[in-house]
Amino acid sequence: MQMDALFKALADPTRLRIARLLSAMELAVGELAQVLGQSQPRVSRHVGILCDAGLAERRREGSWVFLRSRAGPGVDAPVIESLEALLAVAEAEDTDFAAQCEADRRKLAAIRSARDEIAHAYFARHAGEWDELRALHSPDEQVEQALLAALGDAPLGAMLDIGTGTGRIAEMFGDHAERIVALDRNLEMLRVARARLQHLPAARVDLVQGDFADLPFEAASFDTVMLHQVLHFAPDPALPLAEAGRVTRGQGRIAIVDFASHDREELRTRHQHARLGFADAHIASLLEGSGFVPADPIALEGGELVVKIWLGTRRGASGGTGARGDKPPGRAASVPADVPAQATETATTS
């Protein structure tokens, strides 16, 4: 990081405010302009300077551009810590800056509330569908507790939640993983997940739009990969599992939560299920073909549809690379239109 660019980036009070806001939560450019009370072009200019200095980064999600504090390659942890200390001192010693920060916090609270309202509206529209499907299988709480127990006390490390939907699983493991990346192809679902996950530290949670058959991550990027009620949407389950294997580090783990084989044909049309559950032997074969050593499956009875938890451990030494090699950083994900959104995600808002 060039020190002159760093000092230039922090020399303007507006950019200090932006840095403080982005340390609190990820924000769209329009949301940032709303908080600052400035035009989007002006905000974009300030953001560009922060990004050039390595203090912030942009991420496009459909027609929206989201911004967050940058803490990764090229940004030393002491620099980020020093910036936090500088912002705290500036707020403590400059009454005008302190007043602006307090006003910013109130506006951030309003943005959080607006996101919650969007999420509640989505739940209201789809509650009937979710209730219909949940009535066919074990209670969500039972499934979640079994999943927690199955993963045990071993560290989760960097975790990828493929098809995050409403973000419930990412939220559940928020206090257990070092970092969580929540991926979904559906923009509306990502906005619902963002509302649910906005209470977690911004530096530890990423929300990414992408396709589960073409993950936009380098090989061996994650220690734990989760597919919760996602695989039955895949016309060819081998593709997302091959991608999961590619991005999982050696000795990393995968957890698949889905239905055992069933004959409820109406789920194909009413809920866009491409597969009517899975047999244990089929999942074991898919896991082995994707580089995992499968464990004994766990069955959760108590409903017409049996929920299964399948676990696997990635073969190879810790930190090994996947079979297909790395994808270049920043590669855009392919999002084909024929892969449906994860419509069966838990609809609770807790």
Image (cartoon, rainbow, N blue to C red):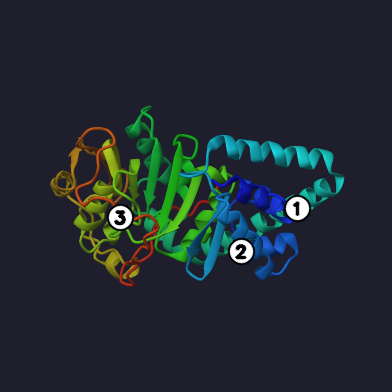
Q: Is residue 197 above or below residue 252?
A: below
Q: Which residue is mark 1?
A: 13
| Mark 3 residue type | Lys
Question: Label 3 to label 1, Cα distance in Å?
Answer: 38 Å
Question: Label 2 to label 3, Cα distance in Å?
Answer: 28 Å
Q: Is residue 230 above or below residue 175?
A: below
> What residue is at 23 percent from the left and 61 percent from the top?
275
| Mark 2 residue type | Val
> What residue is at 29 percent from the left and 63 percent from the top?
273
Residue 110 seen by the camera:
yes
> What residue is at 54 percent from the left and 36 percent from the top?
77
Q: What is the crowding at mark 1: few (fewer than 14 residues within 10 Å), some, or many (at least 20)?
A: few
Q: Which residue is mark 2?
A: 29
Question: Label 2 to label 1, Cα distance in Å?
Answer: 18 Å
Q: In the drawing, what numbered circle is on residue 327?
A: 3
Q: What is the crowding at mark 3: few (fewer than 14 residues within 10 Å), some, or many (at least 20)?
A: few
Which of the two marks, 2 or 1, is nearer to us in this view?
Answer: 1
Query: Sequence-wise, which precedes: disc 2 or disc 1?
Result: 1
- The image position of residue 343, as x and y in percent, is 40, 62
Query: Sequence-wise, which precedes: disc 3 or disc 1?
Result: 1
- The image position of residue 178, as x and y in percent, is 45, 36
Location of residue 89 (image quadrant): top right
Identify the residue at the far right of this view.
95
